[in-house]
Amino acid sequence: MKTALIVEDDLINARVFSKILTSRGGLAVKHTEDVAEVIQIAQAGEADIILMDVSLSRSVYQGKPMNGIQLTQLLKADPQTATVPIVLVTAHAMEGDRESFLQQSGADGYISKPVIDHQSFVDQVLALLPNS
């Protein structure tokens, strides 16, 4: 079974995503907003895909605040974790944001919150999962 790691600072969102991904997507789900833990899970190969909240208001790494864009850059820069697909999830979806977020972060996809169409959300996530 494939595992999705949800990196999200809002527990309600995390629960909603979890529920959709397990019930409709047939995925196992992990959730954390702890940056060191995210890196550890990714490096250990324990996540097949990462759903990354862009804001991560409470996350800190090595003493500095870190948002989802920066964390995605970090994961994409590490050869051990560079191949894990990362989907940015954000409520700040303005025209043009998507492109700039994707460019800045090197992420593989982008989903805006709130997630209204559950099936389309699952389809987007499953489409980015590696086949192996």
Image (tube, rainbow, N blue to C red):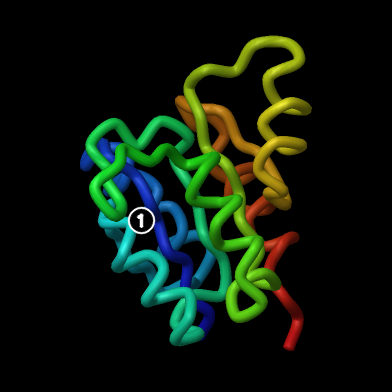
Would you place residue 83 above or below residue 94 in this image?
A: below
Q: Is residue 98 left or right of residue 36?
A: right
Residue at 31% x, 52% y: name it. 61
Query: To which quarter of the image does residue 101 belong?
Result: top right
Q: How many marks?
A: 1
Query: To which quarter of the image does residue 62 belong?
Result: bottom left
Where residue 87 appears, as percent x and y from the top left, is: 61, 49
Mark 1 crowd level (few <14, some 14–19, many ≥20, 10 Å Cα):
many
Where residue 1 appears, as percent x and y from the top left, is: 50, 85
Amino acid beneath label 1: Ser
Report the residue marked by disc 1: 18
Depth check, front residue: 114 or 101: 101
Q: Is residue 42 left or right of residue 100?
A: left
Where residue 51 appears, as percent x and y from the top left, is: 50, 52
Residue at 72% x, 37% y: name it. 102
Residue at 56% x, 75% y: name it. 48
Circle 1 sits in a helix, a strand or a loop, which is it? helix
Looking at this rendering, what residue extends furthest in the top direction?
Answer: 95
Q: Is residue 56 left or right of residue 48?
A: left
Where residue 94 appears, as percent x and y from the top left, is: 64, 11
Depth check, front residue: 16 or 96: 96
Q: Is residue 29 left or right of residue 57?
A: right
Residue at 47% x, 74% y: name it. 42
Query: To which quarter of the image does residue 41 belong?
Result: bottom left
Would you place residue 2 above or below residue 90 in this image?
A: below
Image quadrant for the C terminus?
Answer: bottom right
Depth check, front residue: 63 or 15: 63
Looking at this rendering, what residue extends furthest in the front direction?
Answer: 63
